[in-house]
Image: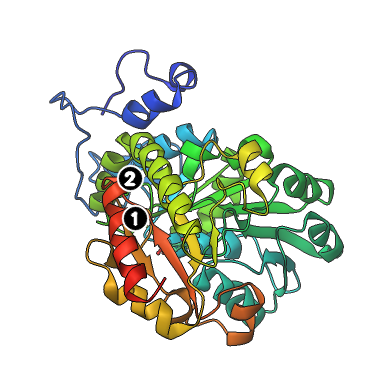
């Protein structure tokens, strides 16, 4: 495997995001293939026993076993790190593997975590159920309230954990302000950037220490594979994350890494068009339903912050149809083009009812506290013509009398 002449970190560092998305991290075999090679190999061979010993001792460069390294996965990790502006990245099998590893690799019994109340259902399960089971204390707060972060800090607080925009409430966290609070207290900030990706928002530019991803969403972007990633400094990845990652094995498969590499090549095109489509759809919906939460709408409570820290607002929004579950399910059942599906970041428009799907596992009281009511729906706007999506929503809304 070799990089194109001069294609080392020093040169790629100066490439712009669109170039990095297509070429960042690429390396070629002796065959000179244009598209990245897919290495489906669990292990690696050594010429001599001494070479194996030297590789295990870290004295010789090279791969030893695909739980630890794989050439295709490594290309993806380098590409994501370059796009994120991070020193290093490790890929994982799913987004939840990334979140779990990013937290557990650095936490011990007796530590304290402050996390956002409004979060993906499984992320809330980590903070509400898993971490406390291992003696890690957690406090969940209204993450859009910057002062609440400062107020929740204790002497043993080790990590701030949040997503922005949040799933599915579309709450934003002021990245610059909250990461500065973390820094001032020696706390590690872990940002789940699945909704925006580096194409719309780079949390490290605002002081985030660790950025974690569900690459299943916008990075693959075509509803094919599950994947995740964790970005940080070289020191943090090598000395804090890697001992956990190598020994517990949330490793990404080479095939899925290859699919995500292909997805990244079109990430910027897709997320830009999907954001434009989403704004048209959100503007239409706002004229027809009780409330729409989309950061690019002037009606969003944190519209100014969205404009300050995001390039565009992404494909996802939430809406309140008014009434309850009957109306929400009625709207879903009336859709003819948009699919009923709980995935997001896909090139297809998809809609789900969070209270009975993605956030079903959350206690009802906790759901209501963050605004996940029975009449709330979450919509991912895809790459179809926005007018077709609007026409479909229009007829489904009419069917429930809206
Ligand atoms: C989907 C999602 C996850 C989990 O990712 P998987 O790839 O499904 O494991 C985590 N955080 C956010 C914000 C998500 O949307």
Closer-to-camera residue (328/201)? 328
Q: Position of residue 205 (x, y in %)?
A: 63, 34
Closer-to-camera residue (340/363)? 340
Secondary structure, mark 2, is helix
Secondary structure, mark 1, is loop
Left/right placement of residue 381 relative to residue 368 reads left
> Do we see residue 287 in this rendering?
yes
> Is disc 2 in contact with disc 1, using a CB cutoff of under 8 Å?
yes
Label 1 CB sits under 8 Å from any ligand 1 atom: no
Q: Quadrant of residue 158?
A: bottom right
Please, is residue 374 above or below residue 31 in the view?
below
Closer-to-camera residue (338/28)? 338
On the image, numbered disc 2 is attached to which residue? Answer: 73
Left/right placement of residue 81 relative to residue 175 reads left
The quarter of the image that holds ligand 1 is bottom left
Left/right placement of residue 401 relative to residue 253 reads right
Q: Position of residue 333 (x, y in %)?
A: 29, 76
Which circle marks residue 114 in the picture?
none
Q: Earlier in the sequence, mark 2 or mark 1?
A: 2
Which circle marks residue 252 in the picture?
1
Which residue sits at x=19%, y=32%?
35
Q: Quadrant of residue 373?
A: bottom right
Closer-to-camera residue (393/31)? 393
Which residue sits at x=27%, y=45%?
385
Q: Quadrant of residue 73?
A: top left
Q: Position of residue 162 (x, y in %)?
A: 63, 58
């Amino acid at each position: 495997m070799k990089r194109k002449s001069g294609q080392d970190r020093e040169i790629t560092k100066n490439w712009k995001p669109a170039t990095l998305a297509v070429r960042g991290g690429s390396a070629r075999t002796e065959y000179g293939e244009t598209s990245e090679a897919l290495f489906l190999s669990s292990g690696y061979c050594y010429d001599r026993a001494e070479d194996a010993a030297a590789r295990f001792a870290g004295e010789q460069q090279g791969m030893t076993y695909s739980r630890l390294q794989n050439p295709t996965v490594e290309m993806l990790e380098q590409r994501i790190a370059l796009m994120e502006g991070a020193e290093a990245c490790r890929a994982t099998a799913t987004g939840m593997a990334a979140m779990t590893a990013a937290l557990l690799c650095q936490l011990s019994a007796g530590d304290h975590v402050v996390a956002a109340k409004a979060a993906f259902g499984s992320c809330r399960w980590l903070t509400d159920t898993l971490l406390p089971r291992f003696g890690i204390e957690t406090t969940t707060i209204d993450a859009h309230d910057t002062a609440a972060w400062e107020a929740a800090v204790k002497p043993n607080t080790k990590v701030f954990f949040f997503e922005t925009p949040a799933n599915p409430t579309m709450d934003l966290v002021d990245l610059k302000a909250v990461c500065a609070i973390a820094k001032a207290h020696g706390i590690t900030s872990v940002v789940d950037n699945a909704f925006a990706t580096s194409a719309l928002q780079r949390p490290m530019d605002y002081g985030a220490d660790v950025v974690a991803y569900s690459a299943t969403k916008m990075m693959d972007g075509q509803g094919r594979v599950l994947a995740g990633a964790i970005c940080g400094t070289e020191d943090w990845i090598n000395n804090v994350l890697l001992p956990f990652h190598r020994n517990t094995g949330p490793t990404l498969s080479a095939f899925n890494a290859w699919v995500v590499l292909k997805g990244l090549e079109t990430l910027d095109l897709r997320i830009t068009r999907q954001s434009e489509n989403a704004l048209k759809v959100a503007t239409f919906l706002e004229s027809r339903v009780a409330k729409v939460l989309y950061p690019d709408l002037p009606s969003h409570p944190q519209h100014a912050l969205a404009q300050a820290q995001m390039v565009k607002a992404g494909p996802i929004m939430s809406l309140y149809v008014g009434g309850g579950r009957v109306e929400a399910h009625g709207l879903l059942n009336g859709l003819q083009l948009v699919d009923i599906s709980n995935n997001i970041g896909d090139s297809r428009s998809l809609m789900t009812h969070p209270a009975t799907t993605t956030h079903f596992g959350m206690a009802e009281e906790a759901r209501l506290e963050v605004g996940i009511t029975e009449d709330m729906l979450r919509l991912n706007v895809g790459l179809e013509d926005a007018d077709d999506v609007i026409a479909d929503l229009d007829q489904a809304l009419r069917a429930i009398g809206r």
